[in-house]
Amino acid sequence: MADRFTTREDCIEMLQEAYKRLNRYPKKSDFTVEEVAAIKSFLGPWPRALEAGGILPDRSAEREAEKKQKRIAAKRRQTQYKIERQKNNRKDETVNEDDK
């Protein structure tokens, strides 16, 4: 049966049919192992597959914004760490000069 699902469009159609038939979000357990493999190979991880099928709202923009915020926060932490390290190095240099 999975042989007929050889394109992206076939996989999307299969997801949409299951959604209509079940009246809920389809789960991986609603399909055979071969069908799940075909869906995931064409559409990616299960949540992305449901988004591609129009079953879940597309959150790709939200995910990108979250990733960007995480990168910004990490960069700020890294910069703050460098500033603190420079301050500590300057303090160590002045202490060493006073000892001479």
Image (cartoon, helix red, strand yellow):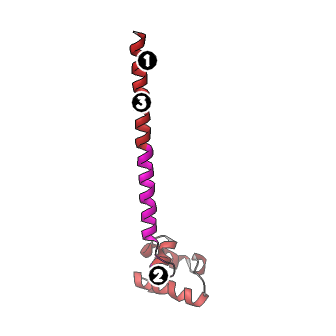
Residue flagged by tag 2: what amino acid is it? Gly
Q: Secondary structure at mark 1?
A: helix
Of circles 3 and 2, which is in front?
Answer: 3
N-terminal of the pair, mark 3 or mark 1, is 3
Q: Secondary structure at mark 3?
A: helix
Q: In the image, 100: left or right of 46?
A: left
Q: Which residue is mark 2?
A: 53
Q: Is residue 48 above or below residue 73?
A: below
Contact, CB < 8 Å: mark 1 with mark 2?
no
Instruction: Confirm whether the magenta stretch covers residue 54.
Output: yes
Residue flagged by tag 1: what amino acid is it? Val
- Marks 3/1: CA–CA distance: 12 Å
- Marks 1/2: CA–CA distance: 65 Å
Magenta region: 52-77
The quadrant in which the C terminus is found is top left
Disc 3: CA contacts within 10 A as few (<14), some (14-19) or many (>=20)? few
User: Which label is found at residue 95?
Assistant: 1
Contact, CB < 8 Å: mark 3 with mark 2?
no
User: Which label is found at residue 87?
Assistant: 3
Instruction: Confirm whether the magenta stretch covers residue 71.
Output: yes
Q: In the image, 94: left or right of 18?
A: left
Disc 2: CA contacts within 10 A as few (<14), some (14-19) or many (>=20)? many
